[in-house]
């Protein structure tokens, strides 16, 4: 039986609900600072999430939702500058501690560390954003809990392409059968699967709840804790409503038994 050696976490929507009240607000603040009257509502942002990556998302917005905008000659430079401003606003918001971790995330990270599990991150977001979230929600030096952090533009293609998971697996030196990926979105599941990862745990949120997770191992409302039971939308229910190491090991074994 392939042994479980590492847990690889997506960040946005998985470790924390950062999209609606974090990234969206930071984009809007960046637009305001640049003198633009663009305002991304909660609904519009849900549509824009079909494209991952902030710079890519701004371009998608201009191509599909704001065609009347008079584009500057250097559109790429303009988007890059807007995005740098958005990142500054996002980091400031994280430093204020506006977004908590999702239920059960800290518990599972600590339990995994105690069990000798290797931890990694695979995300499309900018590396500074990952650091800002970890610093504001976990103990000092918790960034070192993650042996590998794959983030942002270090790979040519963002999720749903497999690049970021492939990069992280290579950095860990592990075959995909030895890891579990944690995701919140259809794009994330597609990305992990395409890199060869066989075991994927999804925790849905308001933006992703209706997406197709049939390719995942299990989809739940959250990872579970004292005030938030983990309930499956698809796949086996965890004992006592908690996704713990024993439950993750059981997912690995039952997947192998059915092969
Ligand atoms: C997250 C994203 C990110 C953030 C914005 O996707 O799509 O683009 O919304 O980050 P996933 P940047 O959770 O699948 O990794 O603005 O820093 O690009
Ligand atoms: Mg995500």
Image (tube, rainbow, N blue to C red):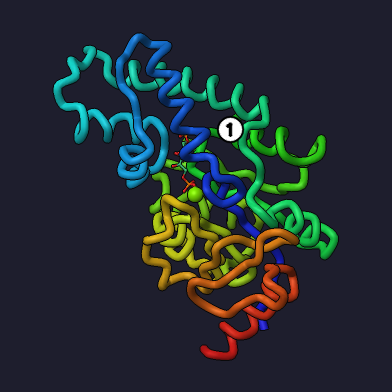
Where in the figure is residue 194, as x and y percent of width and height?
42, 63
Quadrant of the rendering where the N terminus is positioned: bottom right
Q: Quadrant of residue 190?
A: bottom left
Whether the residue carrying mark 1 lies under 8 Å from ligand 1 is answered with yes
- Classify 251 as above or below 123: below
Would residue 115 be seen by someone viewing this image from the given angle? Answer: yes
Mark 1 residue element: helix
Q: On screen, 230 above or below 187?
A: below
Q: Which residue is mark 1?
A: 129
From this view, report whether residue 255 is shown above or below residue 7: below
Q: Please identify the residue farthest to the front as the structure is shown.
A: 227
Q: Is residue 34 above or below residue 209?
A: above
In the image, taking residue 208 as reference, residue 253 lies left or right, namely: right
Across and down, in percent, residue 152 comes to 50, 37
* Residue closer to the observer: 136 or 40: 40
Q: How many marks?
A: 1
Taking the image as shown, residue 189 lies to the left or right of residue 241, namely: left
Q: Is residue 238 left or right of residue 61?
A: right
Query: Residue at (23%, 28%) from the top-left corner?
Result: 62
Q: Is residue 3 among what the camera can see?
A: no
- Of 71 and 92, which appears nearest the observer? 92
The residue furthest left is 68
Of residues 201 and 74, the one drawn nearer to the viewer in this rendering:
201
Q: Is residue 139 left or right of residue 251?
A: right
- 10 Å neighbourhood of mark 1: few (<14), some, or many (≥20)? many
Instruction: Identify the residue at the far right of this view.
Output: 114
| Residue under the point 34% across and 43% down | 51
Q: For residue 95, which quarter of the picture?
A: top right
Residue at 61% across / 78% down in the picture?
Answer: 237
> Residue 149: x percent and y percent?
63, 44
Residue at coordinates 72% horizontally, 39% vertically from top-left? 137
Q: Position of residue 120 (x, y in %)?
A: 66, 51
């Amino acid at each position: 039986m392939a042994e479980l050696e590492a847990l690889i976490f997506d960040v946005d929507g998985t470790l924390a609900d950062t999209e609606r009240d974090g990234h969206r607000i930071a984009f809007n603040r960046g637009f305001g600072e640049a003198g633009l009257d663009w305002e991304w509502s909660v609904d519009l942002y849900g549509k824009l999430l079909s494209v991952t990556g902030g710079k890519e998302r701004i371009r998608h917005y201009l191509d599909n939702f704001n065609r009347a905008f008079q584009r500057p000659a250097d559109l790429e430079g303009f988007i890059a500058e807007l995005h740098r401003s958005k990142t500054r606003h996002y980091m400031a918001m994280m430093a204020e501690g506006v977004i908590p971790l999702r239920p059960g995330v800290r518990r599972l990270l600590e339990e995994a560390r105690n069990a000798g599990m290797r931890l990694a991150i695979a995300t499309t977001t900018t590396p500074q954003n990952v650091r800002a979230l970890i610093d504001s929600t976990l103990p000092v030096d918790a960034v070192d809990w993650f042996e590998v952090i794959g983030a942002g533009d270090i790979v040519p293609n963002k999720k749903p392409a497999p690049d970021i998971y492939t990069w992280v697996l290579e950095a860990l030196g592990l075959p995909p059968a030895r890891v579990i990926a944690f995701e919140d979105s259809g794009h994330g599941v597609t990305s992990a699967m395409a890199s060869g990862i066989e075991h994927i745990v999804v925790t849905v949120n308001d933006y992703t709840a209706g997406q197709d997770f049939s390719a995942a191992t299990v989809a739940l409302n959250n990872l579970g804790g004292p005030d938030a039971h983990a309930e499956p939308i698809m796949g086996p229910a965890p004992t006592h409503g908690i996704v713990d190491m024993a439950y993750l090991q059981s997912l690995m074994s039952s997947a192998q038994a059915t092969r």
